[in-house]
Amino acid sequence: MVAEKSQKDPKEYLPFLNMLKSLEPNYQRYTIDKHLKRYRKALVHLSKSGEEHFTEVLQLVKDQKLFSEALKLYTTDSPQYKRLSSAYAEHLVEQQQAEQAGLLLWRCGLPARALQAFTSCSSWRNAICVAQQIPLPTDQLALLARDLAGNHDNILSD
């Protein structure tokens, strides 16, 4: 098929085809889809290629911003889901969506990081809920509440 469709000289595409033959079938499909810039399909095939390729999954997801698609490919209790959620949360914070990042981190069981995200955007209700879940000692909880109330007052006076 490549030979029929390609305008290239066989010397140009034969090494690529030979390299593909040596790969595991899902990784083969990933390589082809990535080469054709079909990143969503490439992600699906790469996710099926095994744990040893998860670093590549993470990189592809970050490069192509395929966070939502990637999260659907893993179970919510898997370590991969947590790593993808964490990367997505970082992306959301960069996009000035810290509250969404906090909710994502909280849902996937990373309350300390969720608290940081909620605090950074002064989402006081969510921050207090997460702080109680951690649980923070009473004195630290009171300090957090004061800080958040101070930030809330500053926002209202602006």
Image: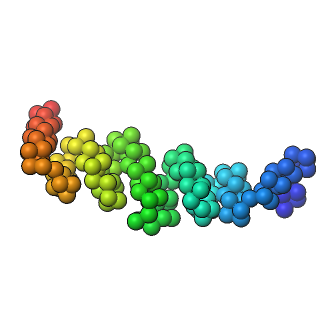
19 displayed left or right of 92: right
Write the residue at 71% across / 64% down: 25
Write the residue at 84% across / 62% down: 1
157 displayed left or right of 12: left
Residue 48's place in the image compared with 104, above or below, is below
**Residue 75 picture location, percent across and down:** 45, 67
Residue 102's place in the image compared with 1, above or below, is above
Write the residue at 72% across / 56% down: 32
**Residue 121 picture location, percent across and down:** 24, 42
**Residue 109 picture location, percent across and down:** 32, 58
Q: Nearer the viewer, residue 49 or 73?
A: 49
**Residue 67 picture location, percent across and down:** 47, 54
Write the residue at 40% across / 65% down: 77
Task: Name the outermost residue toward the top.
Answer: 158
Q: How is the image coloured?
A: rainbow
81 displayed left or right of 116: right
Quarter of the rendering containing residue 38: bottom right
53 displayed left or right of 85: right
Asked if one can make out residue 103 in the rendered structure from this viewpoint, the answer is no
Quarter of the rendering containing residue 132: bottom left
Residue 92's place in the image compared with 76, above or below, is above
